[in-house]
Structures are given as structure tokens and as C-alpha cells.
Image (cartoon, rainbow, N blue to C red):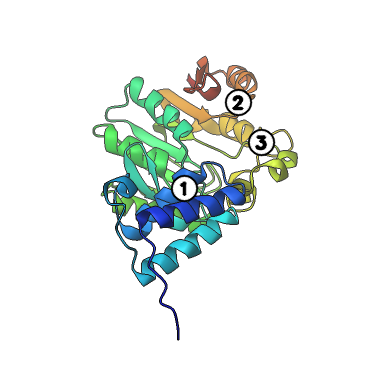
Amino acid sequence: MKIKTKPMNYISAFKRGKDELETSGIADADMDAELLLMHVCNTKRGGRFSHPEYELTVDEERLYLEMISKRSSHIPLQHLTGIQSFMGMEFEVNGNVLVPRQDTEILVEEVMKDGAVGASILDLCTGSGCILLSLLKYVNESRGTGTDISGEALKVAGRNAEKNSINARFICSDLFENIDEKYDVITSNPPYIRSSDIDELMPEVKDHDPRLALDGGEDGLDFYRRIINKASDHLNPAGRIYLEIGFDQGEQVKEMFRVQGFKDAEIINDYSGLPRVVKAHI
């Protein structure tokens, strides 16, 4: 006689997921287990406390255990759920774009602090579109264009614009290659990892983020040289530029701005006190 297995409830499912993730060496195993459970069961945070007796359906249990197995193999959590929060909005993500990270919000906030009402904005290496779309949402009367060399990334950005009801233009372009206009603000989170360092990154990044969005060349600075050398040709008078950087690249990028005649180049730290953005104006 076949013995009927008792369905998992919220608590037992969470514990099993957490244990499997911990065994696989996943950082924040408890958080990831709960977020995957929330995603599968369509519940809010803390559901295991408010409804610990909730029993998963057969399909929910199967899907949850599949996702735990995939997360145990270091597939990013956001690739499993398909979404990432950024600046209070939800963005679709997949293997064609970098997962938006909270540190990048520093760049968006800095543009907003400097006042960009009515600005025209160009976002290079736009990826998911998180920088551009956040600025267009929160900066009144702004308008903008995002460029990326990856057509697949631009499809994701376009869906994110539609999802968040934001009007933006996206162009397939290798940086400024297909851009003729001038803008008030240029932003970018370009590839800045040294080529030799990529294989040392955590598996979630090196194995699942697009290498095209990571590799900044031998010293990690290739894209900064290319952007800064051409930026003044695409900025209006008094135009401003904001670039996200690696923690050890601030002074070098600041010097690039000085050499190209930009003014008031400044390094902005993130909430951990590490250099995160360099900004300047013409």
C-alpha cells in the first residue's frame, strides 16, 4: 500500500529550503529560502510566521523544491524569480542583463540631488534600463535614451519600460556609435571588472551575468576611456556626466575627466563609504 506523504506547510518548506541552501554554501540561505517561498506561494514577507500552517499544493511544493535545487547550484535568486527591486520599482531580469544592485541607486540619487528637471538623459550600457527608467520616473519632465550593444538586453529594457509605464527610447549602439544628439545628462554603469579578475568573482556573477557587461579590459578602465573621450561631443552646454565605478577606480577616472577638460570632477561614496560614482560637467 502506498503511503500518502504529508504536504509541506510553510514552516517545514522554509526549513528544508534553508537547510539545502546552507549545505550548498549559499550566503543568506534563510532569506533566499523565504523569498523563493514567497514567490512560489504568492505570499508576503513573514508568511511563515503569520500562517505557519499553510500547506503547499502539490504544484507549489514541486516548483519550490526545483527552485531551491537551482539556487543551490548558484543560479542567481533574481534569475529564478525573474524580478529585482530597484528605486522602489520592479525590473525584469534574466541572463542577458546585470541584476540591478542597490549600490547603483547612489548614481540615480546623485543625478536627482543635482537637479535634473526637464533634462534630456542618455544612459550608456543601459542593460535592464534601471538607471534611465528610474530617472524618468522620478525626475519631472525628463526624457531619455538608453543604448546597449546587446539587442537581447534592449528587449529586457523595453519590457521594463512598458511594465513601469515609462516612455523611453532604446537604441542598439556601441556606446555613442549610433547617437547623433546632445543631452543634458549622461549616465552609465559600464563594464569595469579587470579581465583577469572575472574568474575570481562569485559563481552567481561569473557564471550567470553576461560577460559583455562585466569585462572592462586589462585594467578595467577601457569603457571609461571610451566614454570620457567622446562625452563632450554629446553633452549640451553645462552638461553633466555620472559614471559608476569599481571601489579602486575613483582617482583614475577623476583624472581622465581632468585631462579631457571636464570641470569639478568629484568622487561620490556609497553607503559603505566606498567610492561608487564619479561625476563631472563640461
Residue 107 figure quarter: top left
User: Closer to the camera, 281 or 66?
Assistant: 66
Q: What residue type is labelled 1?
A: Asp
Q: Is residue 75 visible?
A: no
Question: Which secondary structure lies at badge 2?
Answer: loop
User: Closer to the camera, 188 or 271?
Assistant: 271
Q: Mark 1 points at which residue?
A: 32
Front label number (1 vs 3): 1
**Distance CA(mark 1)–CA(mark 3):** 35 Å
Can you say whether 248 is above or below 76 in the image?
Answer: above
Q: Mark 2 points at which residue?
A: 247
**Distance CA(mark 2)–CA(mark 3):** 16 Å
Cβ–Cβ under 8 Å for marks 2 and 3: no
Front label number (2 vs 3): 2
Q: What percent of the width, then of the height, locates residue 217?
A: 70, 39
User: Closer to the camera, 154 or 260?
Assistant: 154
Which part of the image, by quadrant, shows the N terminus? bottom left
Q: Which amino acid does label 3 sit on?
A: Asp
User: Closer to the camera, 83 or 182?
Assistant: 83
Q: Residue furthest top?
A: 264
Residue sitting at 49 percent across and 22 percent down?
279
**Distance CA(mark 1)–CA(mark 2):** 26 Å
Q: What percent of the width, then of the height, locates residue 81?
A: 42, 55
- Near mark 3 (Cα within 10 A), the count class, few <14, some 14-19 or many ≥20, is some
Cβ–Cβ under 8 Å for marks 1 and 2: no
Q: Name the residue under label 3.
A: 222
